[in-house]
Amino acid sequence: MSRKPDFDGMACPLPLMDHDTIQLAHGAGGRMSADLLEKLILPRFSCEELNRLEDQAVLDLPAGKLAFSTDTFVVNPIFFPGGDIGDLAINGTVNDVAMSGAEVTALSVGFILEEGLPMADFHRILCSMEKSAATAGVRIVTGDTKVVGHGACDKIFINTSGLGVIPSHLNLDSRLIAPGDKILLSGTLADHGMAVMTARKELSFQAPIQSDSAALNGMIRSILDACPNVKALRDPTRGGVATTLNEFAAGSNTGIRLEDERIPVLSEVMGACEILGIDPLYVANEGKLIAVVPGQDAEAVLEIMRANELGREAVILGDVVAEHPGMVTLLTGLGSERIVDMPVGEQLPRIC
Amino acid sequence: MSRKPDFDGMACPLPLMDHDTIQLAHGAGGRMSADLLEKLILPRFSCEELNRLEDQAVLDLPAGKLAFSTDTFVVNPIFFPGGDIGDLAINGTVNDVAMSGAEVTALSVGFILEEGLPMADFHRILCSMEKSAATAGVRIVTGDTKVVGHGACDKIFINTSGLGVIPSHLNLDSRLIAPGDKILLSGTLADHGMAVMTARKELSFQAPIQSDSAALNGMIRSILDACPNVKALRDPTRGGVATTLNEFAAGSNTGIRLEDERIPVLSEVMGACEILGIDPLYVANEGKLIAVVPGQDAEAVLEIMRANELGREAVILGDVVAEHPGMVTLLTGLGSERIVDMPVGEQLPRIC
């Protein structure tokens, strides 16, 4: 129990528990489950809905379109530079809900814990989730904890599902993407994937690559308040920007043309990509968004992104074109144009 | 690939896939992920929201109170008499949402698959989920699939989260339970837990114990249409009836008194409980509900339960009393009264 979490200089001391590690009985629904819940989990996520400890939360929501999303997090290692599985689980689902234009309202959390997981590790993850939920302004209103025997899962897996209400004047729909639209990216590529990959391979760089794990709902609200005509928002996670843009091109039957020189990649990330032979266009990001906006709105949206702390490196990445419908291409500095295809196989397992 | 699923005589043939088992690349977000989704998953759950393949579903819901629940399923074995992890994942979350009085509207599904899981097993589980979702009248509107390496999880884990809208005239709240109320149980106890336990231990009985896994939203609708004054509904899953009733007693600061002779347990289930030294009051059920209703409504609700195929063995199990607040007791046939406590340790790991 030597490792103590420490966020922004604020200690988050481990409560006194009867066991130093997770036991099977912590998931059995009896007294030890109640103990884990009351001492470790509830103090981090306390809110009226959760504290009722019913099997479901009851929320008062206005009428309208509701966005609903789910994601399971199995990242390995569970702690990495710039984040951990806990903040990833909060930010990932906040982002998936927010990309619809919704105000993110509430999250559920489902834990699968491996027998023997150090209680201090679980607590550190819970503290990280508390902090990222507070930063994103969302509440965890319902949850579930299962424990499986040693060897039946790898330390901890977390599912989060999220809800949000979409303002009625918005109509984001990637099928509406049309030639003349611009593709914007809110910052540097491939930070999260390469942070996890280099942490896992124990590659030593002078400064470790930091994950970009962050909740983007604040930036999205600024963008949509100023430019409600945004066609589509998406966070390029698994499969990276290449996958997101291929899905946009296929879904809207348009072509997408990127310019190589505009792609922002940190030099240390590019260095790691080159060592590992990985194209940053295919690497997961966890705190970046792609926005597709009408051409006349592109500069305004770019300004708004850059005014946000999480969007300082935002760029206009390319154009939606009538040529090569369904395909994404990359214009190189030498003037040639190559196809950016969907990834075929496994690139980076358990990156989120 | 010799095992073929067969439901009600209807074959559910395995689509032609490039691989006989789950590969890491099926979870990487690229072409193989898309292949798994398009050939295996989407045909089972096809609906407008899911087919859009966005990172979130968008639902039109009326204003009002929304019930939101999550549950993760790690049952071992994944196939057992009377069900499998798939129908359990649907029915479990449908029930958790429905117990609030809500009309269950939509579910999310998050899969964690182990590399090497036979494709036929995954397909059989998907077919089972399709069937139980259709029976319950709910749609799966959003989902996520992760694959972890061989040995990093045990075959398949499933998270489901669910949403439903609560009619505005209902106000189920276990804190409202008061002396004079009656405790009703919709059928026999401990079927699910003992089905899984005996399947796991390979105990051979003449007839295998069948899980009671079932969606109870239809029965609940009938009950609430006739008796909107129901105080509380709960499905006694992990920890069994003893845990549910202890939570009710503690939350409402009332006493609960059960009568031993009224507890319905199938003879084969009681036999297995006796062999394994397990009290059926602590065993998980997956197709039963406890209803707490005002005394004057008890007979009417009992009639409605018994008129439903899933409630034929319903009983009035006991009374809410002013004595021993916060405690549950059991009156034996001999006239003595003993405390039914919360379970302390692990009784049946990975039962759901």
Image (cartoon, coloured by chain):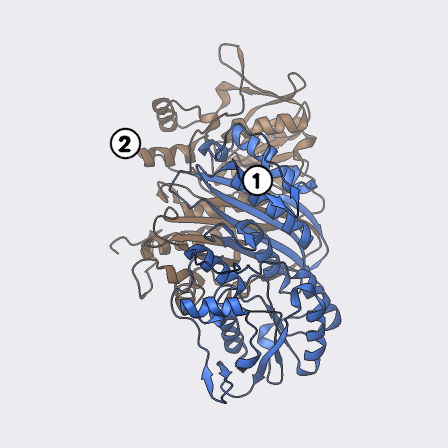
Chain colours: A blue, B brown
Q: Residue at x 68, y 18 (%)?
A: B322
Left or right: B183 in relation to B13:
right
Task: Name, please, the residue furthest toward the left.
Answer: B2
Residue type beneath disc 2: Gln
Amino acid at the residue labelled 1 = Lys
* Chain of the residue displaying label 1: A
Q: x, y percentage for residue B247?
A: 60, 29
Which subunit holds the residue at mark 2?
A: B
- What's the distance in space between the residues labelled 2 and 1, CA to CA? 55 Å
Q: Residue shown at 40%/28% (left/top)?
A: B266
- Residue nearer the viewer, B129 or A113: A113
Task: Tell me if A209 is positioned left or right of A308 in this view.
Answer: left
Determine whether B112 is above or below A260 in the image: above
Residue B102 lies, with reference to residue A22, above or below; the image says: below
Horizontally, residue A57 falls left or right of residue B272, namely: right
Q: Secondary structure at mark 2?
A: loop
Specify the label residue A4 is tagged with: 1
Residue picked out by circle 2: B206
